[in-house]
Image: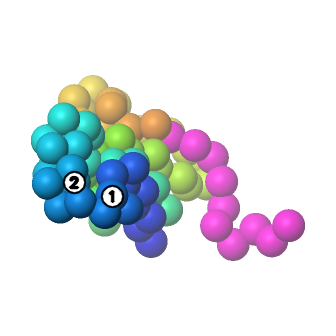
Amino acid sequence: LLCVARSHAFSRSPSMRMSMASSESKGKLLVLGGTGFVGSQVCRVAVQRGFDVTAMSRRGVNPSPGDQDLEQVSYVVGDATDAP
């Protein structure tokens, strides 16, 4: 599951959106299951495309220490199925 937050997404002016998009990161991305096989690939590509990435998983650790792209991801421990 992916969640993307873009601070400039709600700008009313198309020219304002374009100027803001070129000067800021693409946004923040939360990848649930980001340490698994598919999730880690999603994290890697998102970092390469300029997103600020957070990966949530039950382990909460980088699955490939030393990988330059995955070193830029923030890892947090959590379970998306936990109910309050």
Q: Quadrant where the C terminus lies? A: bottom right
- Element at badge 2? helix
Residue at screen point 31% across, 63% down: 12
Looking at the rendering, the stretch of residues picked out in magenta corresponds to 75-84
Left or right, residue 18 beside residue 25:
left
Q: Which colour scheme is used?
A: rainbow
Rendering quarter of residue 34: bottom left
Q: In which quarter of the image is residue 80?
A: bottom right
First in residue order: circle 2 vs circle 1: 1
- 58 vs 27, left or right, is right
| Closer to the camera in the image, 18 or 51 | 18
| Circle 1 Cα neighbour tier, 10 Å, few/some/many (<14 / 14–19 / ≥20) | few
Q: Main secondary structure of the magenta part?
A: loop
| Residue occupying the point 33% across, 32% down | 72
**Residue at which label 1 appears:** 11
Q: Does the magenta stretch include residue 82?
A: yes
Q: What residue type is labelled 1?
A: Ser
Q: Is mark 1 on a helix, strand or loop?
A: loop
The reply to whether residue 48 is visible in this rendering is no
Residue drawn at 69 percent across, 72 percent down: 81
Labelled pair 2, 1 in contact (Cβ < 8 Å): yes
Task: Residue 78 in the image: state x and y as whole percent.
Answer: 65, 54
State the residue at coordinates (33%, 58%): 11
Q: Which residue position is annotated with label 2?
A: 17
69 vs 7: above or below: above
Q: Where is residue 27 in the image (x, y as percent from the top left)?
A: 33, 48
Q: How crowded is mark 2: few (under 14 residues within 10 Å), some or many (20 or more)?
A: some
> Is 40 included in the stretch rendered in magenta?
no
